[in-house]
Image (cartoon, rainbow, N blue to C red):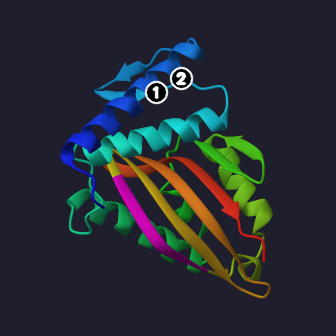
């Protein structure tokens, strides 16, 4: 890598300054909830920039991607349970790892679906049969712990079925009521 601690700290400061300028330029101010920062953004591009900045800040200031980190282990269990539910054909159980709230967001195919019930109906519409569902597998999982109760998860998904499909996803996960849940899912389909 070759970066000295001084260079990393300076890059961290530069990222924070750029992020503050972005907030000022949008005339948005962060809102604090229980020591977690939630930002209001008008576009997904701003959300993506914020996520990258938060990941870089989290990694420099003690964020973890270590496989043995208890948070990473818990999140990997949630994803394994989710894949098991999908592969059993149980969409409702698959959805139990999503935040059961009207504030859940799911972005895919250029559209944003809001709310747990709407996301459930979207899955049922897109995957009406066991054959359409296929067998789900996750690969390349990366968990960036952003705080005690929040994480960013990146990875690839694959459906083994007639006409297999796959793509990439990013999840924002929070620990709510002691359980890790997906509060935002951005899934894209890879072109064959």
Dividing the picture into quarters, in which one does residue 64 lie? bottom left
Quarter holding the N terminus is: bottom left
Secondary element at tag 1 = helix
Secondary element at tag 2 = helix
138 part of magenta stretch: yes
Q: Is residue 164 above or below residue 94?
A: below
Position of residue 28 measured from the top left corner of the image (x, y, whole percent): 54, 15
Q: Nearer the viewer, residue 119 or 74?
A: 74
Quarter holding the C terminus is: bottom right
Position of residue 187 measured from the top left corner of the image (x, y, whole percent): 64, 58
Q: Nearer the viewer, residue 121 or 58?
A: 58
Dividing the picture into quarters, in which one does residue 164 lie? bottom right
Q: Which residue is mark 2?
A: 22
Q: Residue at x 37, y 67 (%)?
A: 76
* Callouts 2 and 1 close, C-beta under 8 Å: yes
Q: Nearer the viewer, residue 131 or 147?
A: 147
Q: CA distance from mark 2 to mark 1?
A: 5 Å
Crowd tier of the residue under label 2, counting other residues whose Cα lies within 10 Å: few below 14, some 14–19, many 20 or above: some
142 part of magenta stretch: yes
Res. 47 visible in picture: yes
Position of residue 106 measured from the top left corner of the image (x, y, whole percent): 64, 47
Q: Residue at x 77, y 45 (%)?
A: 111
Please give left or right for residue 20 compared with residue 123 in the image: left
Q: Is residue 127 above or below residue 173?
A: below
* Magenta segment: 136-144
Res. 175 visible in picture: no
Q: Which residue is mark 1?
A: 19
């Amino acid at each position: 890598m070759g970066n000295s601690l001084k260079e990393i700290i300076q890059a961290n400061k530069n990222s924070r300054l750029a992020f503050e300028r972005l907030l000022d330029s949008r005339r948005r101010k962060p809102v604090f909830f229980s020591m977690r920062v939630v930002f209001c953004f008008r576009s997904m591009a701003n959300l993506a920039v914020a996520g990258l900045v938060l990941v870089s800040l989290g990694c420099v200031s003690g964020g973890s991607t270590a496989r043995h980190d208890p948070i990473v282990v818990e999140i990997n269990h949630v994803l394994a349970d989710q894949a098991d539910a999908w592969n059993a054909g149980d969409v409702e159980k698959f959805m139990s790892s999503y935040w059961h709230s009207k504030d859940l967001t799911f972005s895919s195919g250029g559209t944003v679906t809001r709310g747990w019930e709407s996301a459930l109906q979207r899955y049922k519409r897109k995957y009406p049969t066991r054959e359409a569902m296929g067998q789900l597998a996750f690969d390349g999982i990366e968990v960036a712990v952003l705080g005690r109760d929040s994480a960013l998860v990146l990875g690839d998904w694959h459906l083994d079925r007639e006409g297999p499909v796959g793509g990439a996803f990013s999840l924002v996960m929070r620990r709510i009521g002691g359980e890790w849940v997906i509060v935002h899912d951005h899934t894209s389909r890879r072109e064959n």
